[in-house]
Every structure is written in structure tokens, then in C-alpha cells.
Amino acid sequence: QLLRPDPEQQVFSRVFEGLSRDVLSLHNQVAQAVAGALEVRLSPSEETIMAASKSIDPAVYEAYLQGRYWAGKHGEEEFRRAQGYFERAVALDPSFSPAWTELADIQKRFGFFFADLETSLGRAETAVRRALELDPESGEAHAVFGDLLAARWQWREAEAELRRAVELSRKPGTLDELARRRGRMNPRLSHDWLRYLVTIGARRDADGWRWK
């Protein structure tokens, strides 16, 4: 339901049903329906983006989120749990680049604190290279690769990767382009919601939107 508060009036009411794996499409159906009820016209590019939503297995995304939760803590057992969840995510969907990036990062961090560093960095490099194969424009993956190279004292290569990460993260673009970039790490958020996040987390300059 969508209500107008003053005076109180129901503007829109509808029930939406769908499979959990199609939650992105369902979010966009809601956004399109609400836009129609409010007589807001979507641009052709916005309609195309909404129609092209990618389905994702809920089990993959659940494993990914669980991994990020445990990766946010510090401890050997916590890192092992995070790694296990990320490994589950990429096993279920080998094309899910964000999980490969997070797997590389936790393997690298595990080596810093709890395991043989070079062995861990080797595993992390395999994972981050896979992430970059799947998504060469991922600033997060370039940042992880840069940290990894710095840990090996490969300063020039590390600087290049970190500069690329900053370039991609700060690269100006349209509202839709920044929303799509953020959506790589949050694939189950609707494009409409991602656009909103851009409006509060980025600023609009003469050459386009860029993150603050």
C-alpha cells in the first residue's frame, strides 16, 4: 500500500507474488507499478534496466551475506566460517564475482594473522583473478589485488591496482551507471533502491555523479 499522509488517502494498493530467486524482478515490478500510480514516467533506459534484472539463487546470496557477516569479525574461527560461506557461494554459482572477491580478501587476511602467508596469498590470488575475469570493472576486486601485491612487496604493480580501484570507485557516471556499479556487490537490491542510495551517497558534478 502507498498512502498520502495529509489528507490521508490510499494512492496505491496491490499484492505482488513471485519466487524468491526472482526478488530483483519483483522489486522492479513494484517500482514500475508505483511509478505508474504516481504518473511518473520512466525513461527508456530505466525501463530497459528494470526488465533486465538478473535472477540469483537465494542460497548463493544467503551464503554471501553470512560470509560478509563473519568476515566483519576478527578471529581464527570467524575467518574460517567466512571463508566457508564464500566457498559455498562460489560453488553454487561460479559466476558470482562479488563472492570471489570476498573469498580472496578473507584468504589474504587469514594469511596475515593465522596461517602461512605465501600459501594464503596464492589462494587469494587465484580467487581475485577469477573475480576480475568475471568483472574487470570491479573496484573492490582491484583493491583486494592491490593489497595482495603490496603484501608481496610488488610496489609498482600494487600501486597500479590500487589506482585502478580508486579510478573505478570514483569514476563519474550517470545515476544509472553508479547504481549498476553498486549493484555488483548488492545484486538483490532493486535498481530503483540503488538509484536512491546514489542520491544520498554521491554528489552531482559537471561531468556526472561520483561517490563522495
Image: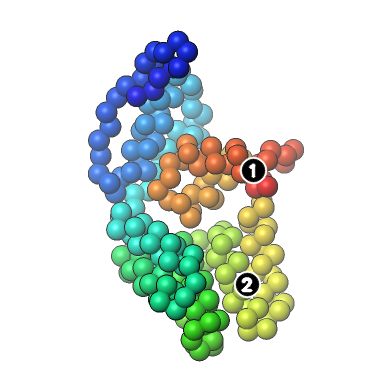
Nearest the eye: 6 or 192: 6
Q: Residue at x 72, y 39 (%)?
A: 205
Q: Which residue is mark 1?
A: 202
Q: Amino acid at mark 1?
A: Ala
State which quarter of the image contains the N terminus.
top left
Under mark 2, the amino acid is: Gly
Residue 146 is marked as: 2
Q: Position of residue 126 (x, y in %)?
A: 48, 77
- As drawn, which residue projects farthest toward the right? 206
Q: Indicate left or right for 6 with 85 as reference.
A: right
Q: Is residue 126 visible?
A: no
Which of pointers 2 and 1 lies earlier in the amino acid sequence? 2
Gap between marks 2 and 1 measured at Cα:
24 Å
Residue 27 versus residue 208: which sits nearer the camera?
Answer: 27
Dividing the picture into quadrants, the one containing residue 5 is top left
Crowding around mark 1 (Cα neighbors within 10 Å: few <14, some 14 to 19, many 20+) is: some
- Left or right of 148? Residue 88 is left
Question: Compared to 38, does 147 lie above or below?
Answer: below
- Secondary structure of the residue carrying tag 2 is helix
User: Tag 2: Cα neighbours inside 10 Å, few (<14), some, or many (≥20)?
Assistant: many
Residue 158 in the image, given as x and y percentages of width and height = 67, 74
The total of numbered circles placed on residues is 2
Residue at point 46% right, 51% down?
Answer: 186
Residue 158 visible within the image: yes
Choose mark 2 or mark 1, whichever is in front. Answer: 1
> Dot 1 lies on which element?
strand
When the figure is inspected, residue 108 is found, relative to residue 133, above or below; the finding is below
Residue at the spot 37% in from the left edge and 31% down from the top edge? 30
195 lies above or below 15: below
Cβ atoms under marks 2 and 1 closer than 8 Å: no
Residue at point 54%, 86% (across, down) = 117
